[in-house]
Image (spheres, helix red, strand yellow):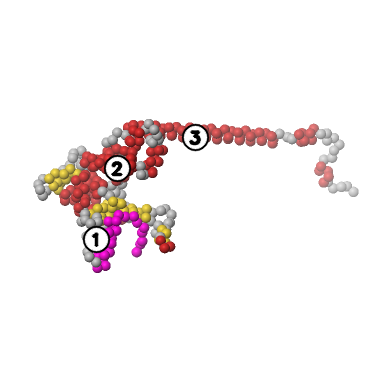
Amino acid sequence: MTTHVGILPDDILDTLLAKLSDESGGEPALGKDLQFLRLPHPRTGVPSLFLPYQRRGTKQRSIVEVQVVAPINKRSWLLSEGQVLENGKLLIMTPIDPAFLLIPVLQPLVPTDGSSGTFRPLDDIFELASEKVMATPPHEPDPKDPSTCLSKEDIATFLSLQCVHSAMKRVCEVKEVTSEITVYRYSPDKVLEYLKSKVDKLNSPVLLETSKTLVRAWAKEGLMEDGKEALLEAGQLKSACDLVCQYAPPNVRTALLASYDFAPLDSYLKTLQEEAAFLAASEMSKAEARESKTSGSTDKGGDKKRKSTAKASVGVTKLKKASTTGMSKISTFFQAKSK
């Protein structure tokens, strides 16, 4: 059996222990069945793994996203008591709002003619959404790689979860026709309104400043300097939007950002980029000038050296001027002597 080091909610551990207890002859437990589902990722559309599980002490189910952090080079885990786990991957399970997972599934139901669409009962809207997702998946699958392909059964299982039914009210317009009949219609405006509520909850300086990455980014952009409080607030708001949009399709992200006024912040950041580009170009020009000057000096030195080499030395010049009258040629020393 493959062993992994993982980070996961306590509720999932309880469910796993309950399942093991049931398999060993103990009392049956609610939510004992764990089934991984391959669903479109809300931001990329790429089929990704998600796991429904039962929350502790209730009959309610929630969903976690399953991710694997795999190092490029081979790694191992050093465990207690000198144990070594050869598989150096880290398995991470993080809770996710089912409303985010509904967005890529229901988006294909939006009419292309600009109309609002039709209200439908829950079963009808789920059946139609499932067919559209399977017919035109958000991400192009590779037939040779099963992990890139969606499963109609997984989509159906996901849509059958009670937590998903509850999440429909957060992304759809809802009408009660009768006490027994309720109809739904996917609403981009409702989605935007819900995401903005997420941004408002996340846009807390105390909460955002716990991220050293964000704080360093604000400091690098000069937003934490005196006199730039308004820009810092806008930067924090945009950071909150970016965090929420990690689980939103590109068109939804565009709509969310457009719903806020980031013009002063964008203008300031554009100026920073232009100044950085100007400084980089200036430094490049100075480096090229230095290189050209150095190259020119080297060439002149070479010319002087060549000229110096070509010019005869003083001794050679004197020898040329010396009188050779009466002197024997050196070749006469190598001639045979006459007897």
**Magenta part of the protein: which range?**
1-25
Q: In the image, 106: left or right of 321?
A: left
User: Which label's residue is closer to the chain start, 2 or 1?
Assistant: 1
Secondary structure at badge 2 equals helix
At x 28% / y 62%, what residue is drawn? 17
Q: Which residue position holds label 3?
A: 284
Q: Is residue 309 shown above or below 50?
A: above
Secondary structure at badge 1 equals loop
On residue 202, which mark appears? 2
| Spot occupied by residue 52 in the image (x, y as percentages of width and height) | 25, 55
Q: Residue furthest front?
A: 206
User: Which label's residue is closer to the chain start, 2 or 3?
Assistant: 2
Q: Quadrant of residue 324?
A: top right
Q: Residue furthest right?
A: 339
The three-letter amino acid code for the residue at tag 3 is: Met
At x 39% / y 33%, what residue is drawn? 226
Q: Quadrant of residue 171?
A: top left
On residue 224, which mark appears? none
| Spot occupied by residue 272 in the image (x, y as percentages of width and height) | 40, 33
The three-letter amino acid code for the residue at tag 2 is: Leu
Q: Nearer the viewer, residue 205 or 96?
A: 205
| Spot occupied by residue 229 in the image (x, y as percentages of width and height) | 35, 33
| Spot occupied by residue 85 in the image (x, y as percentages of width and height) | 40, 61
On residue 32, which mark appears? 1
Residue 138 highlighted magenta (yes or no): no
Q: Residues within 10 Å of mark 2 (few under 14, many from 20)?
A: some
Q: Say which quadrant the N terminus sits in.
A: bottom left
The three-letter amino acid code for the residue at tag 1 is: Lys
Q: Residues within 10 Å of mark 1 (few under 14, many from 20)?
A: some
Q: In the image, 290: left or right of 3?
A: right
Secondary structure at badge 3 equals helix
